Amino acid sequence: MAQKSWSELSSSQQRTIIVVGAVEVVLTLAAWRDLASRPAAGIRGPKAAWALATLVQPVGPVAYFALGRR
């Protein structure tokens, strides 16, 4: 399957990509903010590991919110 350039995508496809990207950025920033403000006792596992895990898109931030917080 050949890759399409941005201009070859339909406007709905472009909009979907922008929305999904924005959601990923917001989730990642929210996870980092929560991670920074939460004491280590409130997190399952090392904070540094969760900080790195949130960089794995899109599952990292979701995993942190679902599994990382006590």
Image: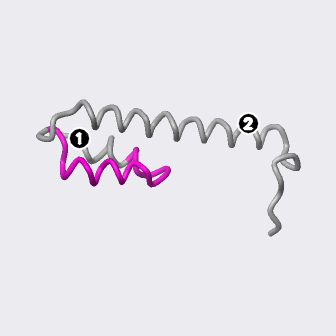
Kindly identify the amino acid type of the residue bearing the numbered disc 2: Arg
Q: CA distance from mark 2 to mark 1?
A: 32 Å
Which quarter of the rendering shows the N terminus? bottom right
Residues 15 and 47: in front is: 47
The picture places residue 19, in percent across and down from the top left corner, at: 64, 36
Front one among 50 and 69: 50
Q: 30 or 66, which lies in front? A: 30
Q: What is the quadrant of the C terminus in the image?
A: top left
Q: Residue 2 sits in which quadrant? A: bottom right
- Pick out the residue farthest to the left: 41
Question: Is 3 a magenta residue?
Answer: no
Q: Residue at x 52, y 38 (%)?
A: 25
Q: Is residue 37 left or right of residue 51?
A: left
Specify the quadrant of the image occupied by residue 13.
top right
Q: Is residue 3 above or below residue 16?
A: below
Q: List the residue tagged with mark 2.
A: 15
Q: Residue 50 at what x, y percent from top left?
A: 30, 50
Instruction: Identify the element where label 1 is drawn.
Output: loop
Is 61 inside the magenta-drawn segment? yes
Q: Which mark is residue 69?
A: 1
User: Residue 22, image x and y in percent?
Assistant: 58, 35
x and y percentages locating residue 59 in the rendered image: 44, 52
23 above or below 63? Answer: above
Residue at the location (45% across, 37% down)?
27
Region of the chain picked out in magenta, as a range = 42-62
- Disc tally is 2
Type of amino acid at the residue the image marks with label 1: Arg
| SS of the residue under disc 2 | helix
